[in-house]
Image (cartoon, rainbow, N blue to C red):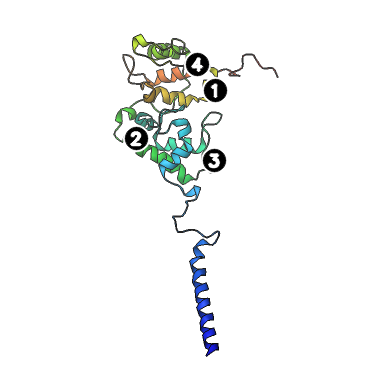
Amino acid sequence: MRTTMLRIATLNTLVTVAGLLCLGCDRIPGRPGPGPEVVRPEEVLDFDVLYKTNCSACHGDHGKGGVAISLANPVYLSLAGEENLRQITSKGVPGKLMPPFARDAGGMLTNQQVNAIAHGMIEHWGQRDLSAAQDGPPYAAAGSGDPIQGQQAFAAYCARCHGANGEGTAADTTANKTKKIGSIVDGSYLALISDQALRSTVIAGRPDEGMPDWRSDGAQPMTDGQITDIVAWLASKRVANPGQPYPTHP
């Protein structure tokens, strides 16, 4: 009888231990917990997450207000188109501020993630019926432009805000213009921005900064040739060693 009772006690103890072990299985180090699984970085395809992580530092939290061109600008998105947005995001702009983001170009994003960013910009901030921008100047210039004619076009369309020589203007409260506009012929600025970015900005404007697009200033909209010439004039202001007060020697 005593032996039977010992066996029963031993069996109960084993059952209790087994139950405790089962309860502790979810707490085994390294085993995923009951919560949602953490998505691997390369599997993230949500536009908001990808944009905030990779783009917002330069282009602004919501595609505007950053130091780089406004992306939440329907005119710009219509001008560039999704394929150009994909290529720029993927390969960047060599020698300028825009780095490549695709893995095959040295970045950290997969092709799917690059596609999600390009498509997301169109979906979030584009306007499918923006025919005015589609009928405007083309995204890329057909020729190199004439700097002399560009200076004349700049004086007609841009000098009122940017100054006669592009060196900026001070705040003028009497004219309801309270914001100082910096120089766009500064050597360091021109060294960091590409001709295409200059062209895109002239065409699409910077609505977040109060800069009109190619249609909104002057007696008539700018022509493709005038825009190309303005970019050529601005590009002619680049210097070999921007930011240095003295020439360098080999």
Question: Between residues 14 and 79, which one lies in front from this camera angle?
Answer: 14
Residue kind at label 2, given as amino acid type? Gly
**Place of residue 38 in the rendered image (x, y in percent of width and height, measured from the top left):** 47, 52
Which residue is the site of mark 2? 126
State yes or no: discs 2 and 4 in contact (Cβ < 8 Å): no
Q: Which residue extends farthest front? A: 2
Which residue is the site of mark 1? 191
Specify few, some or many for label 4: CA neighbours under 10 Å numbering under 14, 14-19, or 20 or more. Answer: many
Q: Earlier in the sequence, mark 3 or mark 1?
A: 3
Q: Secondary structure at mark 4?
A: loop
Q: Earlier in the sequence, mark 2 or mark 4?
A: 2
Q: Quadrant of residue 123?
A: top left
Q: Earlier in the sequence, mark 4 or mark 3?
A: 3
Q: Quadrant of the C terminus?
A: top right
Q: Residue at x 37, y 37 (%)?
A: 122
Residue kind at label 3, given as amino acid type? Gly
Specify few, some or many for label 1: CA neighbours under 10 Å numbering under 14, 14-19, or 20 or more. Answer: many
Q: Where 66 sits versus 169, above or below?
A: below
State yes or no: discs 2 and 3 in contact (Cβ < 8 Å): no
- Which mark identifies residue 107? 3
Q: Residue at x 52, y 85 (%)?
A: 5
Using the rendered image of the protein, determine whether residue 111 is visible from the camera's viewpoint: yes
Q: Where 154 sits versus 95, above or below?
A: above
Q: Residue at x 46, y 55 (%)?
A: 37
Which residue is the site of mark 4? 185
Question: Between residues 46 and 97, which one lies in front from this camera angle?
Answer: 46
